[in-house]
Amino acid sequence: MNEAVAECASSNWHGIDWNKANHQVRKLQTRIVKALKDNKWNKVKALQRLLTHSFSGKVISVRRVTENKGKKTSGVDGKIWSTPESKLKAITSLSTKGYKPKPLRRVYIPKSNGNKRPLGIPTMKDRAMQALFKLALEPIEETTGDFNSYGFRPERATADAIAQCFIVLSRNCSAQWILEGDIKGCFDNISHDWLVKNILMDKTILTKWLKAGYVTNKELFPTTSGTPQGGIISPILSNIALDGLEKLLKNTFSNSFVKARKNKINFVRYADDFIITASSKEILEKEVIQVVKNFLIERGLILSEEKTKITNINEGFDFLGVNIRKYKKKLLIKPSKENVKTFLRKIKVIINENKSTKQKQLIMLLNPVIRGWANYHKHIVSKKIFSSVSSRIYEFLWKWSKRRHRNKSNGWISRKYFKTIGTRKWVFYDDGLELFNSSSVSIKRHIKIRGEANPFDPEFETYFEKRLETKMINDITLSKKLKNLWISQKGKCLICQNLITKETEWNIHHVIHKVKGGNDNISNLVLLHPYCHIQLHCQKLTVLKPSS
């Protein structure tokens, strides 16, 4: 709280009317959707230009890159925007006139298989410029994108892709054969020519981003293909490049009711991972693969011969961390063996790296990891695996406990580190904090998003509000108090009136400050966006609890 107030400085950054800025950006985005639906392409371009040159668009973009996880990570220029003054100055710097992006700072991120993945880090200014143009591109992607594409799109997630797999594979009459598609180096190899020709945005700016190059070990390397990995704009560019494959397959193999019943072609994609179902192995081998290859070639892409394979549903396949397989005609979706191994390996590393850490601190390190993994798999057949994983984690922690007290008895160690809470025994517990138990997570089927649902189309506003409410209420990572606060505010921040989500994050504000006699009861608490919370204190605003 004190840090938030101190950040006010003598700047007007926290005096910005965020509600107005969000409203103006949203209004332009909805107008872009309407123009697209009316096939008014010149109007689309005009509205895009209006948005990317607007003050509202610029302030939203600066705010986005200064409050996300990478806000303290600099590019090749070493600059970050951490003060109100630097953020205000940044707004005026977002101009297309004379704009020249700097090369990306390349770092390497470890992968689960032991290899490393290259990641490019743009400068703060380049990130903000990309965020600005993304505001104008997203309405287009959400209006024209494939219905069953789920990666890097607002309001869509892996759970939707997995739910769609269940829909197209679960019935007795469903397709029995699956093509597991793997695009070789998708993000690194997409054709620049194709992107510049087909992406509906300022061609000059796009070309500059694509050709910016990257720096590693103080040496500059050019980029002749691919999207800038690590850039805010990269996922949406890749999505647009891969859009159209579902429609092509449908038009080729399912353009009539008879052909649809015969071929059973279905398409599910998450980023560059996809599956295609069919009634026979032959149609996938002899026809579908060739259609996919021709589609990709136009974009400078090819299928990985080693990783692309055709599987029968009775053998099962792994997709997005789950295994999908039929057992005696019943489709079951479970966490994949590799996913479980990777998760347990991560847990073991955390425990082994904290041999001398206090028990409470270890619990605080483990809980977010366990909750996150359980939350990911709570929509599928995970109960037995949750129980098995809990047992394995207990074994790790027992070894951790015994290692700390080699001369103590098992009874002494168990009394020190493990408690009985209610009917639950052997709970890893310390100072009011207990280890999260994945076995306690209820399994509840995920309701897949409607394929045509568009978060930038006013027609679907009520639909998305209801989905968000369900998502927040069912989220195991949120306390009962937070859920009740969120519901009482109808999911909206009381300052800017925009939705509060896990992505936006939130702060808890005391209506009557504790120094003035306020308490921690729910009647004295409200949820605010972090920036709105700072703004409230800087401008000495007041906020009231909504009436019941």
Image (cartoon, rainbow, N blue to C red):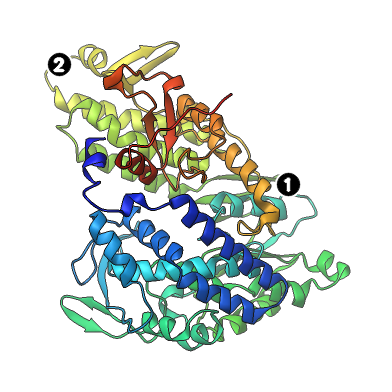
Circle 2 crowding by C-alpha within 10 Å: few under 14, some 14–19, many from 20: few
Residue 281 image position (x, y, % from top left): 69, 69
Q: What element carries label 1?
A: loop
Residue 493 in the image: above or below residue 453: above
Q: Can you say which quadrant of the picture contains the N terminus?
A: top left
Rendered location of residue 438, percent (x, y)? 45, 31
* 513 and 330: which is toward the camera: 513
Q: Position of residue 243 (x, y in %)?
A: 60, 72
Which residue is found at the position 40% from the left and 70% from the top? 130
Question: Which of the pair 172/538 is nearer the observer?
Answer: 538
Determine whether, in the image, residue 162 is placed left or right of residue 513: right
What kind of residue is marked 2? Lys
Separation (CA) of disc 2 from disc 1: 53 Å
Is the C-beta separation of discs 2 and 1 under 8 Å? no
Q: Mark 2 points at which residue?
A: 408
Q: Which of 73 and 86 is in front in this view?
A: 86
Dot 1 amino acid type:
Lys
Relative to 442, say whether 277 is above or below: below
Dot 1 surroundings within 10 Å: few (below 14), some, or many (20 or more)?
few
User: Which structural element holds mark 2?
Assistant: loop
Looking at the image, which residue is at 35% across and 67% down? 127
Judge whether residue 239 can be spotted in this image: yes
Q: Residue furthest left?
A: 407
Q: Mark 1 = which residue?
A: 329
Q: Position of residue 27 (x, y in %)?
A: 58, 61
Quarter containing the C terminus: top right
The number of discs equals 2
In-image side of 251 versus 258 (left or right) = left
- Whether residue 499 is situated above or below residue 168 in the rendered picture: above
Residue drawn at x 54%, y 53% as measured from the top left: 158
Mark 2 or mark 1: whose residue is earlier in sequence: 1
| 433 with respect to 160 (left or right) | left
